[in-house]
Structures are given as C-alpha cells and as structure tokens.
Amino acid sequence: MGDLMNEREDLTLTEVSRLAMAAQSVPRHPGPSSDGISERMSSARRRDTKPEIALRRELHARGLRYRVAYPVPGQRRRTIDIAFTRAKVAVMVDGCFWHGCPEHGTRPRSNSEWWRTKLAANAARDADTNRVLQALGWLVIRVWEHQPAESAADLVEAALQDRRAATCGGIKSAAVIPEVRPLRACQG
Ligand SMILES: [Zn+2]
C-alpha cells in the first residue's frame, strides 16, 4: 500500500520549499474564465464532499470510529479529513482537480500560468502536511475522490490493523510513553 501513501513525497526538499514560497505568493485569480470552473475556486479542501461522506459511512458501517476535520497539530488552517486519533492514522480524501489526480487532474487552459502555480502550491502543501503529521508519528493515507468508498475503506482498515499489530508488547505508542523511544521502530 506504500505506493498509495504519500506519493508526492518524492518531491525534493528544495523543490518543496520553492513551491511553498510560491504558495505564499500565488496572486488572486484573475477572474472566472470560460473553463466553467469558477465554482470550484472557492477552496482547495472542502469539507463534507460526497466521496468523503461515502467513505465515512463505509468506515462507520465497519464499526470504526473517527474524528472529522481534526486539526493538524500546529497548523491553524489545515485539517485531517478523517482522523483516528488513538491509532494516529490520518485519512485525506483528495479532490481529483485540486490535488492533481493523474486520471482526472485537468489543467484549465485560460490563466494557465496562474493555475500551474496554484496547483503546484497545493501539491507542496499536501507534501508538507504529510511531513508534519509523519514527524508527529501519524500514518497518512491519501485516497482520491474517484476511488470507490469500499476500496478506500479497505485501505484504511488494513492500515489500522497494521498499526494495532505493531504495538510492541502491548504498549500502544512511543508518543504516549516518550521514554520508550526505541518502540518507534515497531510503528511501521
Ligand atoms: Zn481522479
């Protein structure tokens, strides 16, 4: 499942910081265009999208309990779509357009330079969010909005099982018991 997680992690650090700087300096969009996408411009990560609700339902039906729009620690404006706080598993449902899905991630033709910068900034922010969460011991799972809820839920469920199986000697997490640092190796 490694290929589904953090596939944007292969951006080099330099590239990420360059893009992060670009993210700060994305100018306002020049205005709605003929691409018919103006309604999608409001926010890159919207809450309660249909695919996200479908996945939540599926997880709930499997008896899993989670938090919705859980804040990323230390990041005022970022949230985890579906968070398993005890297992520290973060699930993000990425929109195909905003997050550049290889199958459906189109690049609008008008204002193309602005969009290129904007979408690159989104990718850089995703990578940065991954890094922040991973540094705090979270496992980040990103699924595309086009992915059927059932297969996405399979991934999440498997990850949760892995995490639980990886608790060494019944001790849940090195993050909870800081003096047991070496256990981090067991967290998968
Ligand atoms: Zn897609």
Image: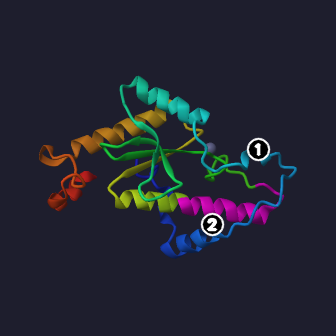
Disc 1 packing (10 Å; few <14; some 14–19; many ≥20): few
Check mark 2 vs ligand 1: CB closer than 8 Å? yes or no.
no
Please tell me which residue is depicted at 52% across the width and 76% down the height of the picture. 14
User: What type of secondary structure mainly makes up the magenta span?
Assistant: helix
- Residue underneath mark 1: 39
Q: Amino acid at mark 1?
A: Glu
Q: Amino acid at mark 2?
A: Ala
Tell me how far mark 1 sits from mark 2, CA to CA.
21 Å
Picture layout, residue 72 above or below residue 146: below
Q: Position of residue 51 (x, y in %)?
A: 57, 34
Please tell me which residue is depicted at 28% across the width and 44% down the height of the picture. 163
Q: Residue furthest left?
A: 169
What's the magenta region?
108-125
Q: In the structure shown, which secondary structural element does the residue marked by tag 2 occupy? A: helix
Q: Position of residue 137 (x, y in %)?
A: 32, 55
Q: Position of residue 90 (x, y in %)?
A: 41, 46
- Residue underneath mark 2: 23
- Is 108 left, or right, of 126 in this rendering? right
* Picture quadrant of residue 52: top right
Please tell me which residue is depicted at 63% across the width and 68% down the height of the picture. 24
- Is 105 left, or right, of 168 in this rendering? right
Picture layout, residue 148 above or below residue 19: above
